[in-house]
């Protein structure tokens, strides 16, 4: 069944051969991935850029990640082999994120790339969570990014929960903690060990987070800065 789904790949001699043909001069590495078709993730790299491609076993779907230096900038999917090879060749050829998105719209990670290049780790964190459409975080992240006070905080996840630090380097976190429960709703708690009973829509959850931050005494980035 797998071979019939990936007939173009099989006929071309495998994903390694496909990427080598599309990206002359690139280095190819393989990483074990038991759930991938063929059992491997294929990584094509050139200079400080790389593209990781995972053909999903049991369905026709490619997971593609574009990397710059040590940072994965994308986590995108496509069913089209031509999009995989075309975007890989363009990215390894040195195009900007905007140029890549214009040529291959499925691989649009412009906001993440801009945040990475700016060196703003807080903005990068928000843009990465915004770009990740999995796990039911979308509506809450969009609502949180519209709230200036939360937007200045550094978002992070731990054991399926999200919380906020005043800065990327501040590790003391008194809460609150947020977790999606489906249908765009989330829970907000102080203690993750206590099973929550109340759920909130995204905008309401943001208001609850702000109230909890006030109650718990969570400092703002400004309060931790010079003279804060």
Image (cartoon, grey):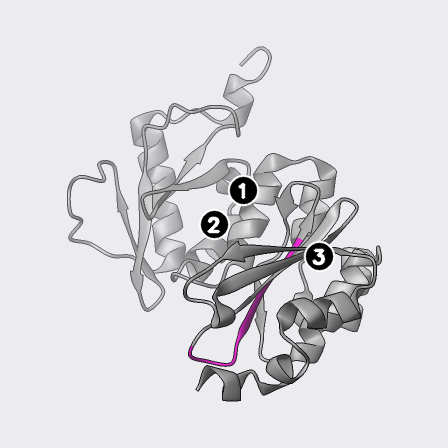
Q: Which residue does the image show at 33% across and 47% down from the upper left?
A: 178
Q: Is residue 159 left or right of residue 105?
A: left
* Crowd rating for badge 3 (residues with CA inside 10 Å; few <14, some 14–19, many 20+): some
The answer to which quarter of the image holds residue 120 is top right
| Residue 129 at x, y percent in the picture | 51, 52
Q: Is residue 101 visible?
A: no
Residue tagged by mark 1?
151
Of the pair 188 and 210, the residue shown nearer to us: 188
Residue tagged by mark 3?
110
| N-term mark: 1 or 3 | 3
| Residue 212 at x, y percent in the picture | 31, 36
Residue 64: in magenta span:
yes
Q: CA distance from mark 2 to mark 3?
A: 20 Å
Residue tagged by mark 2?
144
Q: Is residue 193 above or below residue 46?
A: above
Q: Is residue 82 above or below residue 225?
A: below
Q: Are marks 2 and 1 in contact (CB under 8 Å)?
A: yes
Of the pair 41 and 111, the residue shown nearer to us: 41
Single out the mark in the foreground, 1 or 3.
Answer: 3
Region of the chain picked out in magenta, as a range: 58-66
User: Farthest residue toward the top?
Assistant: 227
């Amino acid at each position: 069944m797998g071979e019939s789904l990936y007939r173009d790949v099989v006929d071309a001699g495998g994903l390694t051969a496909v990427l080598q043909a599309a990206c002359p001069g690139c280095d190819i590495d393989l990483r074990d991935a038991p759930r991938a078709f063929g059992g491997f993730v294929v990584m094509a790299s050139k200079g400080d850029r790389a593209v990781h491609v995972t053909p999903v076993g049991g369905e026709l779907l490619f997971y593609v990640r574009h990397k710059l230096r040590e940072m994965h900038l994308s986590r995108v999917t496509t069913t089209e082999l031509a999009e995989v090879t075309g975007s890989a060749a363009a990215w390894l050829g040195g195009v900007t994120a905007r140029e890549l998105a214009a040529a291959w719209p499925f691989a649009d990670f412009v906001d993440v790339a801009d945040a990475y290049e700016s060196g703003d780790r807080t903005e990068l964190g928000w843009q990465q969570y915004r770009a990740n459409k999995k796990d039911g975080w979308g509506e809450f992240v969009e609502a949180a990014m519209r709230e200036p006070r939360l937007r200045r905080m550094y978002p992070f996840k731990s054991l399926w929960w999200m919380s906020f630090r005043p800065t990327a380097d501040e590790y003391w976190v008194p809460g609150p903690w947020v977790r999606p429960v489906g249908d765009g709703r989330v829970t907000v708690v102080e203690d993750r060990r206590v099973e929550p009973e109340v759920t909130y829509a995204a905008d309401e959850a943001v208001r609850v987070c702000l109230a909890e931050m006030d109650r718990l005494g969570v400092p703002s980035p400004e309060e931790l800065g010079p003279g804060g």
